[in-house]
Image (spheres, grey):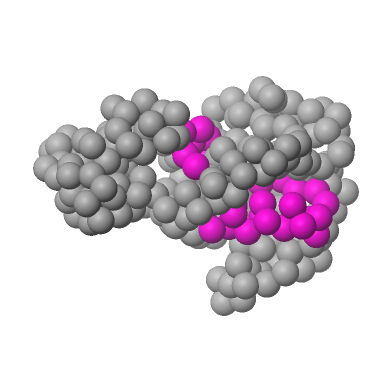
Amino acid sequence: MKCPESIEELQELERMIPLCRKTLYEQAKARIDTGAACSLHEASRQIADEAGKNPESVERAIQREQADRGVTLSPVSEKFKSNEHFRTSFTGDNEWYTPAKYIEAARKVLKGIDLDPATSEFAQKYIQAKKHYTVKDNGLNNAWDGKIWLNPPYSRDLLSLFIEKLVQEVLSERVKEAIVLTHNYTDTAWFHLLNTVSDLICFTKGRVRFVDDKGVEASPTQGSAFFYIGENQETFKEVFGEFGFIR
């Protein structure tokens, strides 16, 4: 785990945690609602300046999210409303499962999985964690400890909350080792937040084809990333190196 090495780094981490709770759209809406910005363009510029991002990229991301939500802060380009790439059910569906070969690789690195905090009874047939939380248990309200496998719900709000929860448990030293599977959305606050406590990241070559409970493969629209937190870094490199490049 990469721990903050100075007061400044700790303060930056604390600043990022609340940002992770809000999507770019929600941040922009809050600025417009409070009068801090008078337009989507101005709100996008402010958010980009604070995060060190490209203002045009931030504005496009907010426009896409507006189209997904069916709401408007300012006129939304029709190309976003009609582009199913951004409305695919896969990105918000919480019932797609990780292919077995990746679970087997994670188990090999972790030497067993103590907890899967975001799962289902069906998935546990092959994940076989010592303890697991389903949607009925609400893993966000329970303690996490030991060696964690986490494939968080991919809906925007839930994903950020699960990443924030993991970071807090790692910093508290209750979680000793973890492997986390997410989309490779390197421009998001949650991705950067998770990176602050991660030791290695495997960016997949090709796309992880998640499966449903009937074994039907999804058609993902983006690549994935496996985050590793822990001391067995050489083992992670050896095992996950076949899936992509590691940084």
Residue 174 lies, in percent from the top left, at 80, 59
Q: What residue sits 72% from the left and 45% below the top? A: 179
Quarter of the rendering containing residue 6 = top right
Residue 88 lies, in percent from the top left, at 34, 47
Give the total of numbered labels: 0
Report the front residue among 168 and 7: 7
Residue 43 lies, in percent from the top left, at 27, 41
Is residue 175 within the magenta segment? Answer: yes
Is residue 103 within the magenta segment? Answer: no
* Magenta residues, start to end: 160-189
Q: Is residue 64 visible?
A: no
Q: What residue sits 17% from the left and 44% below the top? A: 38
Quarter of the rendering containing residue 48 = top left
Q: What residue sits 72% from the left and 69% below the top? A: 143
Quarter of the rendering containing residue 128 = bottom right
Left or right: where 93 falls relative to 83: right
Image quadrant occupied by the N terminus: top right
Left or right: where 90 falls relative to 29: right
Image quadrant occupied by the C terminus: top right
Q: What residue sits 57% from the left and 77% below the top? A: 136
